[in-house]
């Protein structure tokens, strides 16, 4: 079901989406959906009797040279194998799927008329980021408040405010600095993303306000998307949204 919505071939070349621990023909009965595989998430999976953990981020992103419990990645993989818990990741294929991550986040903020910001090919709805419009222009301060309240964001880092009102909004979940130019070309006056660096906030033409809400905050919607896919298509399959998914980044405010 997941791969019908977010095909594995849509993942970026550097990615490791798909089944990471387990076998395709393993029988599973209960799934836990989270952002990351952590020891706390595996605690929850074992406690709730889940034999499948589905996450946005793949637990194995770089090749593992040894298994000696030296770090959390190794411990989690070892534990999943011992406990016969399958681990599956839906990462950049979910980012680039039509109706995927950026689509969901933009919709949550009231942005409509969505189209792909950076399509994989001309005319395709597969690609990264989206751009659309608010029902009517909003004051930037009001839109910032909406972001904070809807997404439960503690801190929003942003550039100089380019204009007093925002109407056309571009969104890219996760690390989206590379699409600032695409947002500008799309005529957006506000670009919402994460993982921006110092120089990314120096928008040269002062026509675009860029805002960074944090990586985890921008991608927490993955839990809802994956939960919806499974619960709507597999009515007899038990799916649980993790209560242990937490942001590894802390803020002193």
Image (cartoon, grey):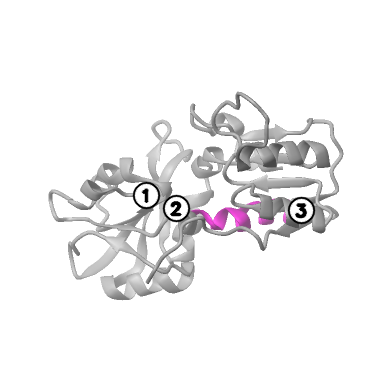
Direction from residue 1 to residue 137 in the image, left or right:
left
| Location of mark 1 (residue) | 195
Q: Nearer the viewer, residue 75 or 153?
A: 75
Sequence order check: which comes first, mark 2 or mark 3? Answer: 3
| Location of mark 2 (residue) | 215
Residue in the image at 52% along x and 39% along y: 92
Return the x and y of residue 232 as percentages of the image width and height: 73, 55
Local secondary structure at mark 1: loop
Task: Magenta stretch: give its range.
Answer: 219-232
Q: CA distance from mark 1 to mark 2?
A: 6 Å
Q: Which residue sits furthest left?
A: 205
Q: From this viewpoint, is residue 139 visible?
A: no
| Location of mark 3 (residue) | 45
Q: Residues within 10 Å of mark 1 (few under 14, many from 20)?
A: some
Return the x and y of residue 158 as percentages of the image width and height: 27, 61
Local secondary structure at mark 3: helix
């Amino acid at each position: 079901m997941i791969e019908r919505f977010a095909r594995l071939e849509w993942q970026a070349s550097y990615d490791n989406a798909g089944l990471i621990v387990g076998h395709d023909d393993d029988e599973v009965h209960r799934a836990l959906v989270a952002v990351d595989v952590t020891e706390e998430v595996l605690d929850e999976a074992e406690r709730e009797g889940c034999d499948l953990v589905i996450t946005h981020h793949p637990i194995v992103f770089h090749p593992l040279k040894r298994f000696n419990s030296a770090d959390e990645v190794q411990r989690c993989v070892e534990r999943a194998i011992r406990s016969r818990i399958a681990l599956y990741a839906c990462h950049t294929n979910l980012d680039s799927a039509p109706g995927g991550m950026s689509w969901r986040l933009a919709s949550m903020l009231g942005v409509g008329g969505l189209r792909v910001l950076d399509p994989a090919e001309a005319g395709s709805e597969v690609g990264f980021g989206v751009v659309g419009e608010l029902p009517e222009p909003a004051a930037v301060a009001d839109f910032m408040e909406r972001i904070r309240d809807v997404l439960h964001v503690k801190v929003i880092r942003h550039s100089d405010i380019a204009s007093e009102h925002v109407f056309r909004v571009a969104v890219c979940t996760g690390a989206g600095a590379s699409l600032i130019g695409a947002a500008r070309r799309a005529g957006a006056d506000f670009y919402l993303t994460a993982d921006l660096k110092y120089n990314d906030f120096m928008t040269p033409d002062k026509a675009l306000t860029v805002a960074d809400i944090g990586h985890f905050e921008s991608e927490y919607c993955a839990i809802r998307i994956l939960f919806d896919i499974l619960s709507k298509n597999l009515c007899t399959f038990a799916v649980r949204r993790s209560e242990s998914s937490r942001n590894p980044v802390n803020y002193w405010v």
